[in-house]
Amino acid sequence: MKLKIGQRVLLMMLAVIVPSLIMLSLLALGATEKTLRDKVTRQLEELAGKAVQSVDSLVQDSEETLTAIATSRQVQTSIQALETADETGRSQALETLDSALLGFQRMDGTLQAIRLIDAEGYVLSKVREGEIIPRKGPASPFSRTSSVSTKGSRSYFQKTLKLGPGEIWVSNLERGWMEEGEYWCPAMVRFSTPLFFSDGRLAAILVINVWGETVGTLVNRMISEDEGSAFLVERNLADPSRHGIYLFHHDSTCAFGNQTGSRITAQSQYPAEIVEGWMSRDQGVQQHPETDDILAHRFYSPYGTDDRGWVIVVNAKKSFFLGPLAVVTGRILAASALVLVLTVLGALYFTQSLLRPIRTVVDGTQAIGRDLSFRIRTDSQDEIGELAAGINAMADALQCNLEEKERIEQQIYEAEKLSSIGEMASGLAHELNTPLGNIRALATLNRKDLSGGKLDPSALDEDLRDIETQTERCSQIITGLLGFARRQNPELALWDMNELILKSLNLLRLPMEKKGIEPRFSPCDQLPQVKVDGHLLQQVFVNMLLNALDAVEKGGQIRIDCTELDHSLRVSFSDNGAGIRPEHRSKIFDPFFTTKEVGKGTGLGLSVSYGIVKNQGGHIEVDSTPGKGTAFHISLPLGGL
């Protein structure tokens, strides 16, 4: 389906605007997404960094607290009493130590418990959550007093025994076990340091339990659940059972899976390449391959080693940090829709302002096609106005040319008609001479009879009748010649082809008889009449017969056939003459082309005939075989022009 100019303009503008909008929108959305990701990445890195600083501060504060308690006067006095005092003095010293440790624990809310354990692993003093735990356990061989409990087999005790003065051991972050009941207490970290007698012998170790919930609160408040999550993962290359466990998580069922039996680890919830990054690099930012979440992590080791410590991870949900992108997308879509609407309106306005003068030019051009005297009127001063002026000028020139062409064609028709008359002149003169001679002879005889007094009325009447017949014959010959030679205005009317062919044959009867040719034509009463200019068409038929007459030898054959086809009437002129050479076939309708001798033809006959038939709405075809003859087929539309 062909598109109109307005549709093409609209499609062209849409073809330019829509891809441009899509490209710009994608670029804008891509840049916005990158900006949001970069911003969130920086924020997550800052959050993870601040979290590490906070956790480090907590650890440092706890170590300072442990050191302060270990070097306090109360603890040092109790150690001296254990070394020098008797049993009563040692008991009093432990009671004084209980009160001092209770005071320390109450002053610092991060402390869950404080213990003093002798070198044999017996807990000599313990305060927990604001209470002094009574000594109801087995007697300590060292102090020869009852103990709270024994911890000699615990790993933190064994590790601390190997430390020197002032050194501190930090335990795993884990849930503690309550001796009095069968349940786990909240998570905590134990800080322990050895205490020595004055002679350098190991006297005891001091242990503080620091609430791990402080670290959990710090981690959990880094980001809301709507925005994402933050959690603490343990890196422990030496202990596979702890490597990758969650220490703190928004979902409490995930934390301490190695103790609670859930066995939930980071490896079971995140892709291996992400977890591997946490366990091998101190810090980094990664993108979840499935959810497109952004994860930033920082490693912190309170133990001072790279293979064991805590990994703080902040996970920002894609739906959170790309939330503003939806707003931007909506605004871009609204702006794009507005641009499209404006584009369509602009295209419609442009096409209307363009098509209105174009339509004027088109209508004017069509009117000129129907009436060459019509001229286009337009107020447009642009290229369209220049086009209209050019078309008007072309119409002026065309009208002048057509008038000149018609005048020249008429002259050519008349010249060719005169040429045909010239070719028929000798035969017509002979044909007129015979009846005129007869008339003269009869007139002479009757004059002699009249002068001699021998006039016979009956003979005179017979001679007069003969003279009348001869005169009518001459009149018919002259009328036919005058009808053929007379200049007449073109006029379309219904004509009988039989009549036109017979008139043409009558004009050439004598030349054909002289050459011994009897044309073959059988009129058909069933032929429909054709709306043509009969006078011009008769000129065509005469030209065709003259050409055939020139082509055949004496006694040759000329045949005329009329055939009704589907929508046309076909008149064929055939001869058995010399035919047309192949090299001349393409030139026979060219003006002034002739193969006749000089003086025997103008070369306009076929050219003029071709023009006349074409102007009647028909066409001429030629079939010719050299040495066998030629046939010209003239087809005329039954409906006329």
Image: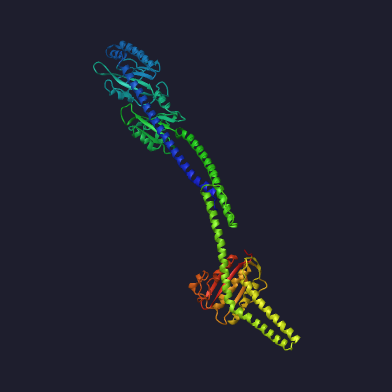
Q: Residue furthest front?
A: 451
Q: Residue furthest right?
A: 457
Q: What number of labels is visible?
A: 0
Q: The C terminus appears in which quarter of the rendering?
A: bottom right
Can residue 595 be seen from the camera position used here? yes
381 or 579, nearer to the observer: 381
x and y percentages locating residue 92 in the rendered image: 33, 11
> Which quarter of the figure has residue 539?
bottom right
263 or 289, nearer to the observer: 289
447 vs 54: above or below: below
Residue displayed at 58% across by 65% down = 615
x and y percentages locating residue 474 in the rendered image: 66, 78
Q: Residue furthest left?
A: 199
Left or right: 285 as drawn, with respect to 599? left
147 or 620, nearer to the observer: 620
246 vs 98: above or below: below
x and y percentages locating residue 620 in the rendered image: 56, 69
83 or 412, nearer to the observer: 412
> Which quarter of the figure has residue 353?
top right
481 vs 184: above or below: below
> Which quarter of the figure has residue 608?
bottom right
Left or right: 30 as drawn, with respect to 438? left
Can residue 575 be seen from the camera position used here? no
Left or right: 240 as drawn, with respect to 27? left
x and y percentages locating residue 172 in the rendered image: 35, 26
Chosen colour scheme: rainbow
